[in-house]
Image (cartoon, grey):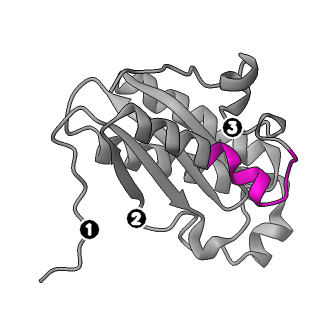
């Protein structure tokens, strides 16, 4: 039996995705790398006519809930998001924080090679995952309340404040 993970992408579910910095390094501690991740998220959303239901960028990993208008889009979306954000983050570190870049032993990988995806087949599951990811910065001791973390969609849901990524609710 193969231990290869199978990502279900044959139906129009929302996808809860998670990917991490290689070796769980805190490569997203600085604001600009987080902005790059969100900028590349925006670019991928436009390229593939996808919708973001929510997101959070943590110091060493990223969560997002993405919905596609067509099936079979998740793998291409994730490959583009990770590849382009990795390129631009590495470029930024080389230029603005070369010492950290060398100390972190970035090697050839910024992100872990794979990502985790969970299909959200009901409104309850979408709400459950939104709450989980919005509470991530609170559980990590980065903020006291979810809306205090600038790098998440919690501010949009709780205060209707802009978060740099268009947020669209979809009915499951």
Residue 158 position by quadrant: top right
Query: Residue 50 appears at what percent x and percent y?
Result: 38, 26
Query: Residue 27 appears at what percent x and percent y?
Result: 72, 61
Residue contact at pointers 1 and 2, CB within 8 angstroms: yes
Residue designated by label 1:
5
Q: Residue at x 81, y 64 (%)?
A: 98
The stretch in magenta equals 133-144
The answer to if 137 sits in the magenta stretch is yes
Depth check, front residue: 96 or 42: 42
Q: Residue at x 49, y 68 (%)?
A: 112
Instruction: Tell me the distance, in whole angstroms, between the alpha carbons under discs 1 and 2.
Output: 9 Å
Query: Residue 70 appears at what percent x and percent y?
Result: 22, 27
Q: Residue at x 34, y 27 (%)?
A: 48
**60 shown above or below 25:** above
Q: Residue at x 25, y 55 (%)?
A: 7
Q: Which mark is residue 152?
A: 3
What secondary structure is marked by label 3? loop
Name the mark nearer the viewer: 1 or 2.
Answer: 1
């Amino acid at each position: 039996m193969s231990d290869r993970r199978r990502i279900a992408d044959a139906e129009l579910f929302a996808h809860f995705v998670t990917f991490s910095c290689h070796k769980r390094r805190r490569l997203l501690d600085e604001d600009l790398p987080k902005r790059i991740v969100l900028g590349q998220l925006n670019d991928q959303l436009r390229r593939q006519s996808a919708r973001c239901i929510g997101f959070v960028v943590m110091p060493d990993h990223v969560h997002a809930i993405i919905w596609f208008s067509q099936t079979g889009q998740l793998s291409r979306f994730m490959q583009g998001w990770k590849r382009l954000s990795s390129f631009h983050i590495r470029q930024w570190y080389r230029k603005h924080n070369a010492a950290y870049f060398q100390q972190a032993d970035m090697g050839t990988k910024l992100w872990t090679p794979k990502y985790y995806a969970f299909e959200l087949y009901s409104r309850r599951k979408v709400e459950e995952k939104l709450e989980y990811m919005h509470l991530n910065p609170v559980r990590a001791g980065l903020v006291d309340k979810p809306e205090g973390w600038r790098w998440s969609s919690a501010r949009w849901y709780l205060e209707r404040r802009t978060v740099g990524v268009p947020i669209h609710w979809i009915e499951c």
